[in-house]
Amino acid sequence: MRTLIIDDERLARKELIKMLAAYSDLNIVGECANATEAIELIESEQPDLIFLDIQMPGKSGFDLLEDLESVPQVIFVTAYDDYAIKAFEVNAMDYILKPVEEKRLSEALDKVRKRLESTKKAEAEAKPAATASESDRMLSPQDQIFLKDGDKCWFVSLKDVRLFESEGNYVRVYFDRFKPLILKSLNNLEKRLDEREFFRINRKYIVNLAEIEHVETWFNGGLKLRIKDGSELEVSRRQASKFKELMSL
């Protein structure tokens, strides 16, 4: 696993690197003291895993994640227990308090290994289901899509889907009163959708723009959307800027 350490405390980085040396399946590709350095290194090194502090000068660990196009697996390492709930809301694999204990570190790495193995397995199983040309083809709102969740099947017009929600290696598809779960990553799905019709508002959701009923400004430069089913969703600061640019005259 290509691994990156992000922490403003030099001694904390060195101590963690020393502990991680015991794991032969880890390759430390770099260390950073702040979010600005980390963004550049993540984009160039494409790590599988990052160990991330939360409170750092300038941008926080959460701010960093919002600024990334593609997010690696994340283990938060922090001296504060106040942010645990928020950490898991952004799909962090684990949340370790400083000083780091060997047992907690080992448990967190086991979770990452299982997630990566599950992702690789899911991708391998999904490949035979469609040819490259079929799986890469851009979708239009008029396309009919086949969905299967357990024993239930649907054949739905894409324009009737109001929302896609990421759940690990799966995507939940919202239409009518149904919300089946399909084996598909939100990142791969995003590549097949026209962002002027289906927009990625944050790491977790893609929204059918025709379903938006109301938009308002929100905290830290973000936006809040209300869609026709009454759901209210936040647009990340990074995506809010892109949304305004894309949709303005």
Image (cartoon, rainbow, N blue to C red):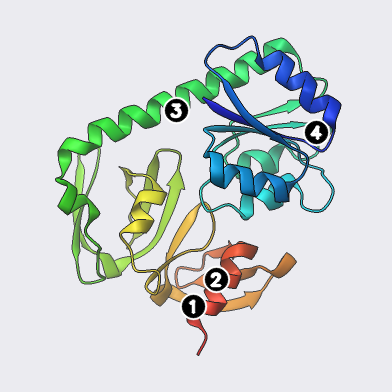
Callout 3–callout 4 Cβ contact below 8 Å: no
Q: Position of residue 205 (x, y in %)?
A: 48, 56
Rounded to the nearest angstrom, the CA distance separating label 2 from label 4 is 33 Å
Rounded to the nearest angstrom, the CA distance separating label 1 from label 3 is 34 Å
Specify the amino acid type for callout 2.
Answer: Lys
Q: Position of residue 220 (x, y in %)?
A: 74, 65
Assign a secondary structure to mark 1.
helix
- Please, is residue 159 above or below residue 153 in the view? below
Specify the amino acid type for callout 1.
Answer: Leu
Rounded to the nearest angstrom, the CA distance separating label 3 from label 4 is 26 Å
Give the mark nearer the N terminus: 4 vs 1.
4
Local packing at callout 2 (Cα closer than 10 Å; few below 14, some 14-19, many 20+) is some
Q: Position of residue 172 (x, y in %)?
A: 38, 49
Q: Which mark is residue 242?
A: 2
Please name which of the two marks, 3 or 4, marks the residue nearer to the observer: 3
**Residue drawn 55% across and 47% down?**
43
Give the mark nearer the N terminus: 2 vs 4.
4
**Residue drawn 16% across and 53% down?**
134
Assign a secondary structure to mark 4.
loop
Rounded to the nearest angstrom, the CA distance separating label 1 from label 2 is 6 Å
Rounded to the nearest angstrom, the CA distance separating label 3 from label 2 is 30 Å
Q: Which mark is residue 246?
A: 1
Q: Which residue is mark 4?
A: 81
Please name which of the two marks, 4 or 1, marks the residue nearer to the observer: 1
Please name which of the two marks, 2 or 4, marks the residue nearer to the observer: 2
Local packing at callout 4 (Cα closer than 10 Å; few below 14, some 14-19, many 20+) is few
- Please, is residue 72 above or below residue 188 in the view? above
Q: Which residue is mark 3?
A: 116
Rounded to the nearest angstrom, the CA distance separating label 4 from label 1 is 38 Å
Callout 1–callout 2 Cβ contact below 8 Å: yes
Q: Position of residue 176 (x, y in %)?
A: 32, 63
